Image: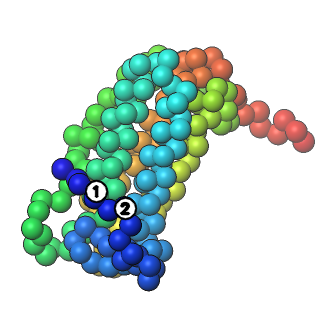
Amino acid sequence: MVKLNRIYTRTGDNGTTGLGNGERRLKFDLRVEAYGTVDETNAAIGIARLSTAGDAELDAMLGRIQNDLFDLGADLACPDDGKPLPYEPLRITQGQVDRVEREIDTLNARLRPLNSFVLPGGTPAAAGLHLARTVCRRAERLTVELTRTDGEVVSDAAVKYLNRLSDFLFVASRIANDDGALDVLWVPGQNR
């Protein structure tokens, strides 16, 4: 269990932050950017949830995802450098990816197929979920870039989780738009 006695430590005053393995990195390090963007995704979902309380099933799914995102942040904040640690680091699992896939399928069964791309909007909850989706895509891009960086290790499950999550957030935005009835559809070239 995490115990936070002090909120400020002053250890980051020099522009560095501590990773889960004790290593210090600059606050603009790619790994820090990746898990920081995961945290942004979580915050955006938190805002969207303010408007999803009317759909208990969706809200419960989003609550589980918010918890998963803390797991993912912990995973990314503790690089697997092969050195022993005095604790078992938290890692995203394939089981978490599989659960998100099942939840996508559950929600998608309520929706009619699309004939066009969907513009972000409709209800406040849908707009918030679209914002969370775009932040999630940024987290995914940064995490994939991290996997391509020499000396950095990121699990396949972490990358898969972010990829599935952005899909989940898209489907969830449609659910929040009265099961797609309030989706705002893109009309190509409408304003030419």
The image position of residue 139, as x and y in percent, is 46, 56
Residue at 22% from the left image edge and 71% from the top image edge? 21
Residue at 43% from the left image edge and 24% from the top image edge? 58
At mark 1, the secondary structure is: loop
The image position of residue 99, as x and y in percent, is 28, 34
Depth check: 174 or 69 in front? 69
Depth check: 13 or 88 in front? 13
Residue at 58% from the left image edge and 43% from the top image edge? 131
Q: Amino acid at mark 1?
A: Leu
At mark 2, the secondary structure is: loop
Image quarter where the C terminus lies is: top right
* Residue bearing mark 2: 7
Q: Are marks 2 and 1 in contact (CB under 8 Å)?
A: yes
Q: Quadrant of residue 165?
A: top left
Query: Does residue 113 appear in this view?
Result: no
Q: Give the alpha-carbon distance from disc 2 to disc 1, as whole Å.
A: 7 Å
State left or right for residue 111 relative to residue 86.
right
Q: Amino acid at mark 2?
A: Ile
Dot label at residue 4: 1
